[in-house]
Amino acid sequence: MADLLGPEFTSFVGNNSALFLLILVWSLLWKGIALWKAARLSHKRWFVIILIVNTLGILDIIYIFFVANRYKVETNETNN
């Protein structure tokens, strides 16, 4: 697989593995939070968009702080 991207890319990734790891953790953190909120709020379209589009956390942060904050999760609690 690495040969498909070329030796320059492989060398760049190898020399900057800490940067790539940081970007990976950053993206996964924000994507996980955004997907969790979208699922809890039943925002199916947002869930699919966030799942497919990779923007290094930018779209995820926009959804979390500007879209999801406008909604509340409704729960049905019963007292037994």
Image (spheres, rainbow, N blue to C red):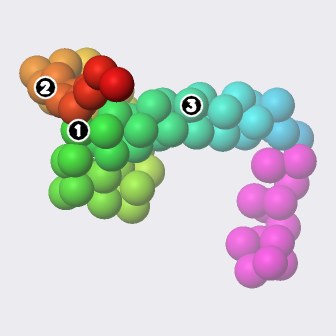
Residue at 30% from the left image edge and 21% from the top image edge: 79
Please tell me the numbered disc located at residue 29. 3
Please tell me the numbered disc located at residue 67. none
Q: In front of the other: label 1 or label 3? A: 1
The amino acid type, in three-letter code, at marker 2 is Tyr
Residue at 80% from the left image edge and 49% from the top image edge: 13
The residue that disc 1 covers is 41
Image quadrant occupied by the N terminus: bottom right
The amino acid type, in three-letter code, at marker 3 is Leu
Tell me the element at label 3: helix
User: Which percent across, then down, holds residue 74?
Assistant: 18, 29
Q: Which image quadrant is residue 66 in? A: top left
Tell me the element at label 1: loop
How many C-alpha atoms fall within 10 Å of the one at disc 1: few (<14), some, or many (≥20)?
Answer: some
Where does the magenta region start and end?
1-14
Which of marks 3 and 1 precedes in the sequence?
3
Which of marks 3 and 2 precedes in the sequence?
3
The residue that disc 2 covers is 71
Q: Which image quadrant is residue 48 in? A: bottom left
